Amino acid sequence: MRGIFQHKKGGLYRVQGIAKHSETTEPMVIYQGIEGDCPIWVRPKSEFEDGRFTPFDAKPKIDKVALLYLCDKKLLTAKSHGKDVYYFPGGKREKGEGDAECLARELFEELNVTLNPDSITQYGTVIAHAHGNPPGVLAKLTCYTAAIDGSPTAGNEIAEVKWLTYSDRPNVGCPMKLIMDELWHKGMID
């Protein structure tokens, strides 16, 4: 059981996996909100089978690629002018542009660094509420790891470049919260 589900009251959640209750061995679903603070929850699997939750056909309106770059257990992020949260560097593809081309262009424009194209590896994709948009507007964020040449500095559209730890989670949008939770649970960020 994986994917995005909608609760009968309207909330959207992604199922993380199935676990067993430590005392009863009852199957439990581990799931996470993809809106707001993106809390992680657990509830009996039977509640996902009784009509409270239904599979949700997520159709993101925003589709971006991003660089997931770690150094000393901190994440490289940027904040655009006029924005109130930090983002992974990256952005939307231009017409005819592949993910690697888009990422290389965006990194050069945003951070004045060059992407090493031979080092690109897809980390994963998340779908969550697009920060600053009305409820129900979803963003798809495809994250890559890669080596870069140069020292990240703010480009034209960037107000600030900052290295974040998990304590900075309140200062990022929903897609990043999902990735940061995963990295923190894996011990990859402080």
Image (cartoon, grey):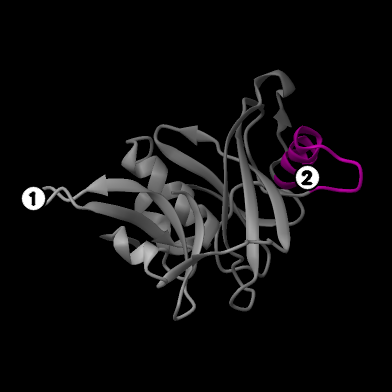
Residue drawn at (37%, 69%) of the image: 50
User: Circle 2 sits on which residue?
Assistant: 109
In the picture as drawn, the residue positioned furthest to the bottom comes out as: 9
Is 114 or 63 nearer to us in this picture?
63
What's the amino acid at mark 1?
Answer: Glu
Residue 23: which disc?
1
Residue drawn at (58%, 77%) of the image: 135
Residue 9 visible? The answer is yes
Residue 179: which disc?
none
What's the amino acid at mark 2?
Answer: Glu
**Dot placed on the residue nearer the N-terminal end, 1 or 2:** 1
Q: Position of residue 127 (x, y in %)?
A: 58, 55
Is 109 or 43 nearer to us in this picture?
43
Dividing the picture into quadrants, the one containing residue 97 is top right
Position of residue 21 relative to residue 171, above or below, is above
Q: State the quadrant of the C terminus.
A: top left
Mainly helix, strand or loop, the magenta region? Answer: helix
Dot 1: element: loop
**Is 107 situated left or right of 12 in this image?**
right
**Is 77 situated left or right of 1 in this image?**
right
Q: Position of residue 43 (x, y in %)?
A: 27, 62
Dividing the picture into quadrants, the one containing residue 132 is bottom right
Dot 2: element: helix
Highlighted magenta segment, given as a residue range: 93-110
Residue drawn at (70%, 51%) of the image: 64
